[in-house]
Amino acid sequence: MSDKPIYKVIFYNQSQVYEVYARAIYQSDMYGFIEVEEFIFGERSQMIVDPGEEKLKSEFDKVTRSYIPMQAIIRIDEVEKEGPVKVTEIKGGDKIAHLPRSGGVTPPKGSAD
């Protein structure tokens, strides 16, 4: 393995699932976010262009750090080398349910006592 680890980060972004590679991941000082830095995009010498990879390259072009909400993270893996980045559409028939969040509000004490 190289000196610096490589991480595969899979997360939700609107109605899509992004799979990207990065060299640095941190828990953010901003509560509820993961910081992702040093995105890795493979330099392909082939003539075939993957539109998903090109979309991600242009979206993260000139991004030094990205803050991803923790609830959007599906998985983070440490890998030996980067692979192709992917964008996958979430189809309407998929069995994915977004759970409601309370926003951290706690009920007043003594109201049910």
Image (cartoon, helix red, strand yellow):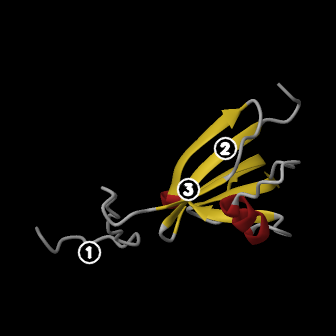
- Nearer-the-camera pick, 26 or 50: 50
Say which element carries label 3. Answer: strand
* Residue 75 falls in image quadrant: top right
Direction from residue 102 to residue 26 in the image, left or right? right
At which x and y percent is residue 51? 69, 63
- Pointers 2 and 1 in contact (CB under 8 A)? no
Earlier in the chain: of badge 1 and badge 3, it is: 3
Residue underneath mark 3: 11
At which x and y percent is residue 65? 78, 63
Give the residue at x 30% y 61%. Answer: 93
Give the residue at x 32% y 70%. Answer: 106
As measured in the structure, the alpha-carbon distance from the residue carrying label 3 to the one carrying label 2 is 10 Å
Residue underneath mark 1: 108
Amino acid carrying label 1: it is: Pro
As measured in the structure, the alpha-carbon distance from the residue carrying label 1 to the one carrying label 3 is 34 Å
* Residue 105 falls in image quadrant: bottom left
What number is the disc on residue 8? 2
